[in-house]
Image (spheres, rainbow, N blue to C red):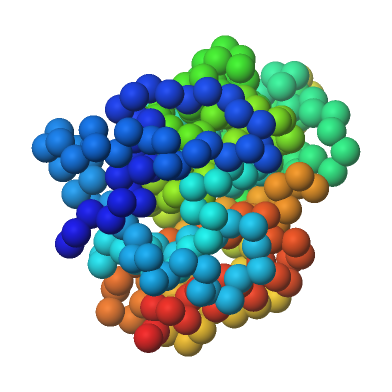
Amino acid sequence: MIKKIALVLVLAMALTGCTGNVELDKPYDKASSPASELLSERLTPFAADLCVINTGTMNDGGVNAYAYGYFDINGEEVLSCDNLFERVYPASTTKIMTCLLALEGANLEEEVSIGDAVKIDVSGSSMSGLKTGDRLKMKELLYALMVPSGNDAAASIAVHMAGSEEKFAELMTKRAHELGATHTNFTNPHGLPDENHYTTVYDMYLIFNEALKHDEFMEISSTPVYETEVYNETAGTSRKVTWKCGNGFYKGDFSLPEGITYIAGKTGHTNAAGFCLCLGEADERGNRYISIVMKSPTYEDLYGGMINLARKALV
């Protein structure tokens, strides 16, 4: 398959090391990237299994959103996209990277003591209901992170693994760049608004694609409801908790086309980011796809767009 110029451009910054913070409404100039450098043989191993763009797929997906992409993993092709390389706020899709770092660097059976990092005073913040003094396994904490999209869980993971949210965010950005997602910068583990916390649809594809290689990620991010018992060391008591996923496909608000199966996903929403969703899918032949929609204006537009993208796998 010919490596289209779009893939060449998105990898350019990985080689030059340029990751400057630019205002979100001033996307980097793709035409200025040193594409000729990227034609060297040293890129071949990195790019060999990544999706590349067919220029005929631009903005033809029936999606009402600022940016989106539909990626055929088996065919190594972008089936539809718009503003694939423009900066967007990721909101809670940030937690895909938080979960990935935990899966790569933590013992899922280790006990984690919850501290004051769970005290997040942000209006509308998505929480899992963790309390200072709680104690639970890292794997349970990942369910708290991904199923109800707990910002308190994200902060607790960050502090446990790196000592602070800021240091953990640095590790997140470093890992993103290692994956080729060099137009991403994380400042926190949960996705709460920050003008310097940004990504692109293509970068999120790279991160999500890596996360899907972990069976635990597939298991956790495809769980609609999770129940467990949490022990609180301070009170010396236990309580049962139930976490529910806010994904519209799991809630029954929407359905994927017949023949397409949901295999993993993560939602996100803030006023600045709009409605966001990273979704892993499979067809009846076992072929896999990744749908990413960022900054859709409404909940209905987000899922309507996702459904329209999924139909492309059936053509």
Residue 67 occupies quadrant? bottom right
Is residue 74 or residue 189 the one in the foreground? 74
- Is residue 252 left or right of 157 when viewed as pictured? right
Is the residue 176 above or below the residue 206 in the image? above
Residue 60 in percent (x, y) is at 51, 74
Is the residue 280 above or below the residue 208 in the image? below
Residue 148 in percent (x, y) is at 67, 50
Labels in figure, total: 0
Residue 312 in percent (x, y) is at 43, 79
Residue placed at 79% from the left, 25% from the top?
Answer: 119
Residue 185 in percent (x, y) is at 54, 29
Residue placed at 30% from the left, 39% from the top?
Answer: 35
Residue occupying the far left of the picture: 41
Is the residue 223 above or below the residue 232 in the image? below
- Is residue 22 left or right of 151 when viewed as pictured? left
User: Does residue 227 show up?
Assistant: no
Residue placed at 11% from the left, 37% from the top?
Answer: 41
Residue occupying the far right of the picture: 123
Q: In which quarter of the image is the C terminus?
A: bottom left
Residue placed at 37% from the left, 65% from the top?
Answer: 55
User: Does residue 184 show up?
Assistant: yes
Q: In which quarter of the image is the N terminus?
A: bottom left
Residue occupying the far front of the picture: 32
Is residue 44 or residue 152 the one in the foreground? 44
